[in-house]
Amino acid sequence: MYNSPFLQEQIKAGNINFGTQVLSFNIGGNETVEFDTRTDLDFDEIVGLYFNGDFYLDLWDIRAEIICNGRIIFKRNTVIPYLNNNNFESVFWVREVAKGSTLRIRLENLMPMFWERDFIRANVVLITAKYKKPVPKPTFEYALETVLFEIPESGITDAPPIPVPNAGIPFTKDFDFKLEGTTIELVNLFGYYSMNYKIMRRSTIDLYIDSKKVLNKHDLGMFMADKWRKPHEVCLDLNLTVNNPRVNGTFYHGYEEAELIYGYRIWLALVTKKKL
Amino acid sequence: MINFKIIQVDITKANQKVIINDTTEPDITSIKGIFLFPNQSLNVRNYFGSTLRLLVGNREVLPKNFDCEIIADNGFKSWKSIKHNVDISVDKSSITGEYLDGGHAIYPYTMKIYLEVVKK
């Protein structure tokens, strides 16, 4: 997904010209923006997308849904971890035929504004491709399923930094999710976090997928992607085929120093692959 | 599937030496890689001077005085880029060695030795 073999082949064969279509939004605190448009006419496919903005966008909890030709190409409630990077490194690769196609983009900011910002400017950048020779239709579809922890449990409702209850005392948090999708292959696992890497450094996780223990007190920081480390560099290989899998486990917060730490969020991201 | 064997080394004071004495579980058939994951650091060189010697069975995988910094996560590199690749067949094999702290860390801390393994 984040390292598309198909595109590598096309680049090697000299069969592809890349371009971009940028869609910009101003989004305020606790606001939802929905926008209908059409893709440009001068390319064949959307082959990837990423997000960037004019501020530290990872401080907010912004989620996106992108529908092209009536098909969801970026799933609602999938977080926009790529906002962290503000660059081209973490592209979400898709393949969708698009030439003047309908495009619906929905952005939700689940947090209030702070630091005297009235809004933030977010861009959805579509990476486009025009092929010199026709290409075969895609046979697989990749998607990203995410599981989100919000700590403290009450959620982040004020400007950071906010003290975490019981700061200085390690605590645990159980999580239990059901993901939708039949006969899907769970390809990789990686994570994203907001704020403070020190928390990741000392935190561990137990993870079960359909009651199978996948991680046992595993260091969280090891497979967290961030501005230094791309998802494909830190991801863990799963290669499990599942139906509507249950994803559960326990998060062990290990940060012991009694100082103010930011409220924070952790996403576990599962890369899934499905036959078309 | 994700398969690691983790050996935890707890350091409480500067220049402490910790003896490693472990065994691979019966379902582990080989070791493919080694890297270290400390629970502190970032941009300071907390592990400067810390060394690890490691033997699997009688085979020396990391020699005496091997600098931990070379294969330790520092918060900026991925585990895949620091991993030392090996290919060692094991069958309930002993894992022995010693970790020697270099005296530059904040104490106490934990150093985890991650062994990437293949299981039956």
Image (tube, rainbow, N blue to C red):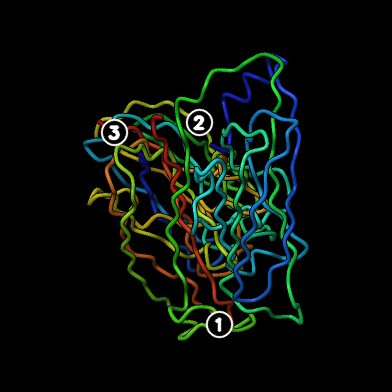
Element marked by disc 3: strand
Q: Residues within 10 Å of mark 2 (few under 14, many from 20)?
A: some
- Quarter holding the C terminus of chain B? top left
Give a yes or no on whether discs 2 and 1 share a subunit: no
Gap in Å between the C-alphas at discs 2 and 3?
A: 17 Å
Q: Residues within 10 Å of mark 3 (few under 14, many from 20)?
A: some
Gap in Å between the C-alphas at discs 3 and 1?
A: 45 Å
Give the number of the disc on residue A157: 1
Element marked by disc 1: loop
What amino acid is labelled 2 in the image? Asn
Q: Where residue B94 appears, x then y in whole percent?
A: 30, 38
Q: Nearer the viewer, mark 2 or mark 3?
A: 3
Give the number of the disc on residue B119: 3
Gap in Å between the C-alphas at discs 2 and 1?
A: 45 Å
Q: Where residue A172 appears, x then y in whole percent?
A: 36, 72
What amino acid is labelled 3 in the image? Lys
Give the number of the disc on residue B85: 2
Viewer-side residue, B111 vs A132: A132
Query: Horizontally, is A83 left or right of A193 in the view?
Result: right
Q: Where residue A212 appears, x then y in whole percent?
A: 24, 48
Look at 55% across and 82% down and name the residue there: A157
Give a yes or no on whether discs 2 and 3 share a subunit: yes
- Quarter holding the N terminus of chain B? top left
Query: Horizontally, is A174 left or right of A100 in the view?
Result: left
Task: Answer above or below: position of A230 versus B90.
Answer: below
